[in-house]
Image (cartoon, rainbow, N blue to C red):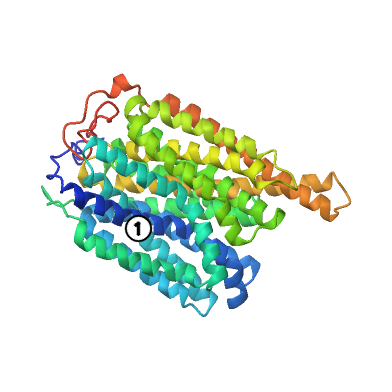
Amino acid sequence: MPQTSPSLSPSSPAAPAPSTRRWWTLVTVALAQLMVVLDSTVVNIALPSAQADLGFSNADRQWVVTAYSLAFGSLLLFGGRISDLIGRKRAFIIGLIGFAGASALGGAAGTFGLLVGARALQGAFGALLAPTALAVLTTTFTVPKERARAFGIFGAIAGAGGAVGLLLGGVLTEQLDWRWNLYINVVIALVAVAGAVVFVTTAPRTGPRPKLDVPGTILVSAALFSLVYGFSNAESDGWDSPLSWGFLAAAAVLLVAFVLWQRRATHPLLPLPIVLHRNRAASYSAILIAGAGMFGIFLFVTYYLQATLKFTPIQTGLGFLPMIVMLVLAAQLSTNIFVPRFGPKVMVPIGMTIAASGMVYLTHLGVTANYAADLLPPLMILGFGMGSTMPAAIQTATLGVDRHYAGVASAMVNTSQQVGGSIGTALLNTLAATAATDYVASHLPPTPQVMAEAAVHSYATAYWWGAGFFAFGAVLTAFLYRRRSATATPAAGGAGSSDSADVPEPVVAH
């Protein structure tokens, strides 16, 4: 990095807030995180009802999901940096109010265009809210034991929010109306805003206010937009679509240009030492790979339960509850007992290996199955694996970063998860569709029984690839994470500097 780069040496943190206030801050942040995470799946359950009500086509249906992911994924780093510049409490409240307003607009939408526009607006405010919530947590909890407990809860919500969305979406759609899948965000946001006003504190700024890196913001936002759109288009139009490859190629060029610009920018949007630190690089990689693998669980198990076993939306959501329970249990055990003792170099690869074994277990499912005997064990294994992976990776991804850059470092967590989900959506859907087509071609004529078997075969293909993602992640993170002896010196000052053993060294300008 050139000498004009901003110093990222940790600064002295503000005096910690009273313990009770910190835990109420965690409740507030957890509500915001849950709202953002569950919104990615709760709307999926409502799509058929919304389509029947508003009268849009199957081809247009994907835009209700894609509009959100495009805005969210492309603006995450920008949102994280904005929270660093204007203050996290202000950014947090703006994000909550904006997300609630966009949700209300979508719930009241009378046309397809207004619904898609509201979803894009949701994504934009979500890109401000998600990294700000994690940054608030990072700068609030600096005592090692409390930090571990707080990140265990936050990581459990990040991992389980999708399944909670499936359950909540089923209940709201069946018992009320599809519009309540959007209106529910207004209720959650109102409670979170009240909590933010009372409990979230703002640390005084020290030193001059940095400027926003406008060229870097434009480059990375365009790159992330192209990346998410390229994978989304590949899901709908196939990998042979020129539009898919064109956007993916543009994303690669723009990302290279962004990195080159960050090397010389006076006020870089994403100081490169943040992502070049080995422990943080390992954590971002783990979150990306877990995001890609988790997609196979939610999407294809949902298809299997509803299309093959004929579960209702509520029964489908309830079917995921044991996985959520195991995920929360594993998250607490991991962050409070195992990570302090063994470190992320041991726990993250173990968690990914457990998740891979759960994916392999799912491949044995047939056209008929008993939930308790055939589905419950692999879902519990997957929950335990994800609960051992996500909290440890998220906590390590934000350790040792100066509080002035906590927002953009936190945004990288959400960006990794979003990009991983986009990759998983496109790749696993394509592989599953190809497997189904090949199965039918080799088992002509295409009777209903053959079609049902082809669907189950396609799900199994996705599970095998998901297991491969997790296995690759286990090997990669075992290599990237530093040994405990290499991280034994705590960072001096900064958020999380009082953590021992597995605290990454302070980020410094090269």
The three-letter amino acid code for the residue at tag 1 is Ala
| For residue 490, above or below residue 25 | above
User: For the point 55% across and 47% down, which residue is it?
Assistant: 295
Q: Determine whether, in the image, residue 457 is placed left or right of residue 153.
A: right
Q: Determine whether, in the image, residue 163 is placed left or right of residue 371.
A: left
Where disc 1 sits, the SS reads helix
Q: Is residue 249 visible?
A: no
> Where residue 351 appears, x then y in whole percent?
47, 33
User: For the point 63% across and 36% down, which residue is it?
Assistant: 361
| For residue 106, above or below residue 422 | below
| For residue 194, above or below residue 302 | below
| For residue 129, above or below residue 137 | below
Q: Nearer the viewer, residue 11 or 39?
A: 39
Q: Which residue is mark 1?
A: 32
Quarter assignment of residue 460: top right
> Where residue 300 appears, x then y in whole percent?
63, 49
User: For the point 48% across and 71% down, which residue is it?
Assistant: 180
In the image as oriented, which residue stretches furthest toward the bottom?
Answer: 110
Quadrant for the C terminus in the image: top left
Q: Nearer the viewer, residue 443 or 188?
A: 188
In the image as oriented, which residue stretches furthest toward the front?
Answer: 372
Quarter assignment of residue 478: top left
Q: Is residue 297 visible?
A: yes
Q: Nearer the viewer, residue 332 or 249?
A: 332
Mark 1 burial class by Cα count in 10 Å: few <14, some 14-19, many 20+: many
Q: Determine whether, in the image, residue 317 is placed left or right of residue 407.
A: right
> Where residue 7 appears, x then y in whole percent?
18, 39
